[in-house]
Image: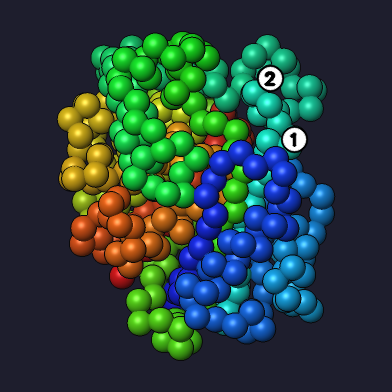
Amino acid sequence: MRKVSIVGAGMIRFGKFPERSIEDMGSEACLSALKHAGMKHKEVEAAFAGNIGHPPNVAQRILDVIGVSGVPAFNHENACGAGSSAFRDAYVAIAAGVYDRVLVIGVENMTSKMKGLIPVDDGANLMVDMGVVAPAIFALMANRHMEDYGTTPEQLAQISVKNHKHGALNPFAQYQKVFTLDAILNSDMICDPLTVLQCTPIADGAAALVLTSEEVSGQYTNKPVNIAASVFSSGRGKTGVGTATMEGCIRASREAYEIAGVGPEDLDVIELHDCFSAHELMAVEDLGLCPKGEGGRMAEEGVTALGGKIPVNPSGGLLSKGHPIGATGVGQIVELVWQLRGECDKRQVEGAKVALAHNGGGVGSGFEPGAMSIAIFTR
């Protein structure tokens, strides 16, 4: 397997743009990434796109707008992990020697199709009909964490305070507003203990990456970001939803650490799938950043904030930057590329050399993520 690099990264600001088509948003992100890479559009050999809510051939439709035609184009649907699925397959294709230069695209327009709770089923699933939807699942896990470890609602809400503070520094974030702890706690209750400001918003957006083999990366930049590991898995079956952990995250992250030759203590910056504050609470533990039960304390003490020991979600995360489903996983990696290249201005993590992206998608066996992506990057 060959080594793979990221030489370009671009995205549009996430937000609510019902008037913008996926071709419009996706092409803007792709052109930004190609410009960042210094690559001509005719050099692109293939494209991989993540999207869940639009008609077929999303990649082809975007490529047509930017003048790329006749190349293989692959489209991925994997719930919130759609963009990471596209990234993973692009990485494997280059590592296997199939291509040298590819585009990865994540794009979604949710506001034109969705309002309120994101549909998760066609109505044929008894558990969903009984109310076991995403907010309920993560609320159950949050309550279990509180019961088992003494985590407080204030510690849980502090995660959202942190991520909104980070998002206020990010010109690409959907919400660039700082909220107090009281404001988070007193916002509308969605599913106890998760208030609305602890849940990700409906969003539109697009992000893109340019991947190359390591051998040709020097043709485009003297600051390539190396993909040290890319691991993709699905949840394993288990009984009940009352456990405050994600086994799939533990398993995938440990495999990624082994492949990359690093450990959680070596990470400088993390972009993490905080679809709800409870997910970040559990994921920092499952990734091995602290012992089980200490995630709330980490948030309360500022360990995971900018300026802390291990900044998590300097972009603002899904809670503040936004969660346009197909674009989310790619957008996380775009942020980490910029961080490792020192291009993040006020939210820059100084001296960042090793980064991790954590992205989950949907609900699979045992109420584990249907898709779990862990990727590690180095400079």
| SS category of the residue bearing label 2 | helix
Three-letter code for the amino acid on which mark 1 is drawn: Lys
Quarter-of-image position of residue 96:
bottom right
Q: Amino acid at mark 2?
A: Val
Q: Dot 1 lies on which element?
A: loop
Q: Position of residue 113 (x, y in %)?
A: 75, 35
Q: Residues within 10 Å of mark 2 (few under 14, many from 20)?
A: some
Can you tell which of label 1 and label 2 is closer to the viewer? 1
Location of the C terminus (image quadrant) = bottom left
Sequence-first tag of 1 and 2: 1
Residue behind mark 1: 113
Residue 356 vertical placement versus 226 (above, below): above
Q: Is residue 58 left or right of residue 27?
A: right
Q: Is residue 46 above or below residue 165?
A: below
Return the residue found at the far front: 19
Q: Is residue 296 found left or right of 78 in the rendered image?
A: left
Q: Nearer the viewer, residue 311 or 322?
A: 322
Q: Badge 2 is on which residue? A: 128
Residue 78 seen in the current view: no
Residue positioned 46% across, 57% down in the render = 333
